[in-house]
Amino acid sequence: MLKVMYPIAKPAPGSAGKTAYWRWQKPIINREMCTRCGLCWVYCPDSAYELDEEGYPIVLYDWCKGCGICAHECPVDAIKMVDEYGEG
Amino acid sequence: MERVRRRYVLTGNYAAAYAALHSRVEVVAAYPITPQTTIVEKIDELISKGEYDTTMIRVESEHSAMAAVIGASAAGARTFTATASHGLFYMYENIWWAANSRLPVVASFVTRALGPPWNIWSDHQDVYALRDSGWILFIARNAQEVYDLIIQSFKIAEDDEVRLPVGVSHDAFIVSHTSEPVELLMQDEVDNFLPSPQNIKPLLDPENPVSVGNLPTAEQHYLLRKNIWDCITYSLNVIKKVGREYTELTGRDYSKLIPSYKTEDAEYILVTSGAMGGDAEDAVDVLRDMGVKAGHLSIRLFRPFPHDELIDIVAGSKAILVFNRGVSMGLGGVITADVRDSVSKESLSIPVYDFIVGLGGVEVSKDDFIKAVQDVKAVKLDVRRTYFLMGGEYV
């Protein structure tokens, strides 16, 4: 019996595999400055943010593509985009 | 409901409309374009009279028409659409979405030349462009074949080992708007022949959410296309099986993938597709009266290409003459290339002559076929050349 393959994806965390390999800048969160507003978690287009039990954001670096939207939206500039690879 | 089968005088387009409705299509979405318009007009008319419980979605373009039937088909509905020429090309992106999503959509394509300049007449160039997509493609010769092939198409498309869209084409005006006798099946015969639309496995199911056509890896994409190759190759068996069942039901012969005429002892075999097959058969009769052993075969199934049957028919011939109602610019006839591929795979040394006819709706007559055979027989033609034959002259 020939088995037909369908181009379907079941919703699951990271169902397309680890998609962060082309990231060249990563967001670093300064916990001292963070007000736990959660906007980074809301705006992340890849759901690459989780909130810990105290409400602080955690970046899921396996799936963060480094777009920088979180850093742009952070109202207190607690997120900095840092180059993934050093000079040269 | 009819209690006896009746013959009606129908155009090819009305035959297509009745075939879709008799197949109990649940969703039709279409946008009008000459020469396809009367298919969907007829469907709409019969739905609005309350004769059929089919949903007609009036969309704003052919791109949306195919998108709508893709969505309905993914949800498990039996679907149908129809278009032609520029409409088909406006639909073209979604043609591939239907095939790659493995949706059993059935469509009627009325072959029509592509502009510019504007032209509404028959030419197979539009349907040739669907060749590599993964659609199963028929080219019907007359209104009866339009009706018969569309009904069979639902059974082929929905087969668990095929799951591919099927397109049934017919020539603009020559078939689409010409009235001829067509025997329609009774509704209960079609109901018994086709599986219930309820059996179509939906891709989209709220209880088991998935997304269709999401971003895969390159390797997954490769394997999905390879799977279409496996299934469309296997579909030759399904098309034959469904054809045999349909032959048993109707007495009309669909047991073979390639209809042929006087080919058993033929030395010169004419290969055509679509409506010009009738003229080619007339030419065969004239040539036979002149003492030339000619025969004819029709590429009714364009994809998957019926290699084995073609070879069985042509193996003993002296020359094959292929008549294409469209051209692959810079190469030659599309079906000529297919026939040469088959002949080459079997290492046969039969010359395959390439003719381009009927572009833009130019009439193809039996005299064109007779001239071509006579010229091949008199060794006047070069097998490496492509001959543009219009009105009995090479142009």
Image (cartoon, grey):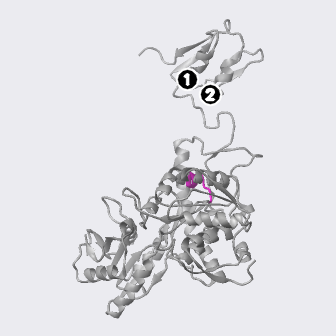
Give the letter of the chain under mark 2.
A
For badge 1, the amino acid type reads: Cys
Residue A67's label in the rendered image is 1
Q: Residues within 10 Å of mark 1 (few under 14, many from 20)?
A: some
Residue B212's label in the rendered image is none
- For numbered disc 2, what is the local secondary structure? loop
Which residue is label 2 attached to? A45
Quadrant where the image shows the N terminus of chain B: bottom right
Residue B248 appears left or right of B223:
right
For badge 2, the amino acid type reads: Pro
Magenta residues (range): B97-104
Query: Which badge, 1 or 2, comes first in the chain's sequence?
Result: 2
Q: Residue at x 63, y 10 (%)?
A: A78
Foreground residue among B326 and B245: B326
Q: x, y percentage for residue A60?
A: 64, 24
On whether disc 1 and disc 2 are found on a single subunit, the reply is: yes
Q: x, y percentage for residue A55?
A: 75, 16
- For numbered disc 1, what is the local secondary structure? loop
Residue B288 sits inside the magenta stretch: no
Q: CA distance from mark 1 to mark 2?
A: 9 Å
Q: x, y percentage for residue B29?
A: 62, 56
Foreground residue among B36 and A34: B36
